[in-house]
Amino acid sequence: MWVLFIIVAAAALLIFALSRVRVVLFVEYCGGKLVLKLSLGLAFGLLPVSARAEYAKGRIRYSLPWAEVDESIESFVKNIAGIKKEKEKRWITIPVRRILSSFRIAKFRLKSTIGVQDAAKCALLCGLVQGALYALLAPLDWKAGAYPVIEVIPAFNRREFSLKLEGIAWFLPAQIIFEGNQKASFKASAGG
């Protein structure tokens, strides 16, 4: 019985490692309210897991699949500081570059409105922001036919800022695991 369970678990892990994971990100900021949504679609996007966070007027409200919380920002920061202190006792490193290098971006759409009450400064700022964002996104690994869409709209003679970001990306867990093992084997073979 245990052998069958181990075989089924190993097969499930292998299928998961070789299947694509879909990551959907949505960020919106307008009028002092910030909304973040993150959704992971495991096993080719068939098993969704999502999280949502919202900040407005000194309160943060977030929901995870197992909990929903509404608290003041002070208590939220205090809780994060407690977690950070616990992590300092243990040595945990997350290979962010390795993980991000395996992402293939399928959709990136950013729409922003910027206003600084001076038409000339506003036009220059919008042009600089849009150009810088395109330059930052150029070296990323884009899925065939997917290119970033960035709209920076000037709000002349008004003081305003709003942002809306939508993105979809895919990655293979097996690719992250393979790259990690490959780098570890290079270190071992070099004697270090």
Image (cartoon, helix red, strand yellow):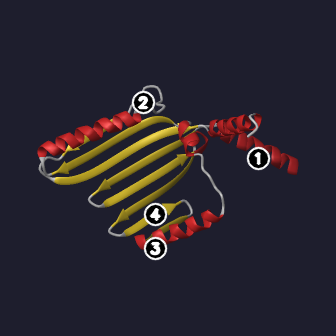
Look at 47% across and 35% down and name the residue there: 105
Binning the other alpha carbons within 10 Å of mark 3 as few (below 14), some (14 to 19) or many (20 upward) gives: few
Q: Label 2 is placed on what type of residue? A: Ala
Q: Badges 1 and 4: C-beta atoms under 8 Å apart?
A: no
Q: Which mark is residue 9?
A: 1
| Closer-to-camera residue (2/98) | 98
Residue matched to label 4: 62
On the question of residue 1 being in view, the answer is no
Binning the other alpha carbons within 10 Å of mark 1 as few (below 14), some (14 to 19) or many (20 upward) gives: few
Residue matched to label 3: 75
Q: Label 1 is placed on what type of residue? A: Ala
> Label 3's element?
helix
Upstream in sequence: badge 2 or badge 1: 1
Give the Cα separation between the discs numbered 4 and 3. Answer: 13 Å
Residue matched to label 2: 146
Q: Label 4 is placed on what type of residue? A: Tyr
Upstream in sequence: badge 4 or badge 3: 4
Give the Cα separation between the discs numbered 3 and 2. Answer: 41 Å
Binning the other alpha carbons within 10 Å of mark 4 as few (below 14), some (14 to 19) or many (20 upward) gives: some
Task: Nearest to the eye among marks 3 and 2: give it.
Answer: 3
Residue 34 location in percent, x, y?
35, 58
Upstream in sequence: badge 4 or badge 2: 4
On the question of residue 10 being in view, the answer is yes
Give the Cα separation between the discs numbered 1 and 4. Answer: 32 Å
Left or right? Give the position of 148 relative to 103: left
Look at 42% across and 42% down and name the residue there: 167
Task: Nearest to the eye among marks 1 and 4: give it.
Answer: 4
Query: Looking at the rendering, in which quadrant would you find the C terminus?
Result: top right
> Label 4's element?
strand
Give the Cα separation between the discs numbered 1 and 3. Answer: 40 Å
